[in-house]
Image (cartoon, rainbow, N blue to C red):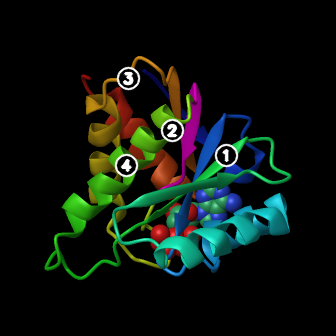
């Protein structure tokens, strides 16, 4: 799997799937979640509601998949990152599971390309440097014969610099 890094807006990505940093309710929120629902239109929320009715939301570390609505991406994979609790609530493992479960779901749907935001590093306050290390390790360690390319989309320059540093290290 090739790994790419870009700075920008994930709603503009032309990958088969984009990942959303959702919350357990799946009913939308602020940050990247709000941006994805705004850009993708009401079809995404409708699909999230159907999943909620079926399984009652999404647990931390898990992921669900919906249509991409009006986005260029065919699918949105909604994963729920952990809220930072000073490392007392297995947040590192849960964040890793977000990346792994999103990649598994992308494989199940034959996605060749996928884009990730910097899950949990906004409203959920996960320390950015640690989050970048976890994200890069999880994606590098995931061996796939289906997914050809994973893109990290950093919105803020601080995350972009951290990912540049992380990705320049030996694979
Ligand atoms: P969380 O609740 O998981 O922390 P946030 O949406 O608050 O989720 O933030 C996650 C990351 O998404 C942050 O690093 C934030 O800068 C970034 N972000 C916000 N809007 C966008 C966007 N349109 N595209 C890509 N990343 C975004």
Residue 96 seen in render: yes
Q: Which residue is mark 4?
A: 101
Q: Is residue 153 left or right of residue 100?
A: right
Q: Which residue is mark 2?
A: 106
Using the numbered discs, state the Cα–Cα distance from disc 2 to disc 3 in whole angstroms.
10 Å
Any atom of ligand 1 within 8 Å of the CB at mark 1? no
Q: Quadrant of residue 72?
A: top right
**CA–CA distance in space, label 3 to label 4:** 13 Å
SS class, disc 1: strand
Residue 8, horizontal then vertical, whole percent:
68, 48
- Dot 2: few (<14), some (14–19), or many (≥20) neighbours within 10 Å? many
Image x and y of residue 130, in percent = 26, 57
61 above or below 1?
below
Q: Secondary structure at mark 2?
A: helix
Label 1: few (<14), some (14–19) or many (≥20) C-alpha neighbours in 10 Å: many
Residue 69 pos. (x, y %): 81, 54
Q: Label 3: which residue?
A: 144
- Residue at image position (37%, 32%) is 167
The boundaries of the magenta stretch are: 111-118
Q: Which mark is residue 63?
A: none
For the residues labelled 1 and 4, say whether their Cβ atoms are less than 8 Å apart. Answer: no
Determine which residue is flagged by label 1: 75
Tell me where residue 157 sits by quadrant. Answer: bottom right
């Amino acid at each position: 799997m090739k790994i790419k890094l870009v700075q920008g807006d994930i709603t503009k990505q032309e990958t088969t799937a984009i990942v959303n940093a959702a919350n357990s309710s799946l009913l939308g929120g602020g940050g990247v979640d709000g941006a994805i629902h705004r850009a993708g239109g009401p079809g995404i929320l409708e699909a999230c509601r159907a999943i909620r009715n079926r399984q009652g939301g999404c647990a931390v570390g898990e992921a669900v998949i919906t249509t991409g609505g009006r986005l260029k991406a065919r699918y949105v994979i909604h994963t729920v990152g952990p809220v930072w609790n000073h490392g007392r609530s297995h947040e590192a493992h849960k964040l890793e599971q977000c990346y792994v479960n999103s990649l598994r779901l992308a494989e199940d749907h034959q996605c060749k390309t996928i884009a990730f935001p910097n899950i949990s590093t906004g409203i959920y306050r996960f320390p950015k440097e640690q989050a970048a290390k976890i994200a890069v390790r999880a994606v590098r360690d995931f061996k796939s014969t289906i997914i050809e390319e994973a893109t990290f989309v950093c919105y803020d320059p601080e995350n972009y610099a951290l990912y540049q540093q992380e990705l320049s290290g030996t694979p």
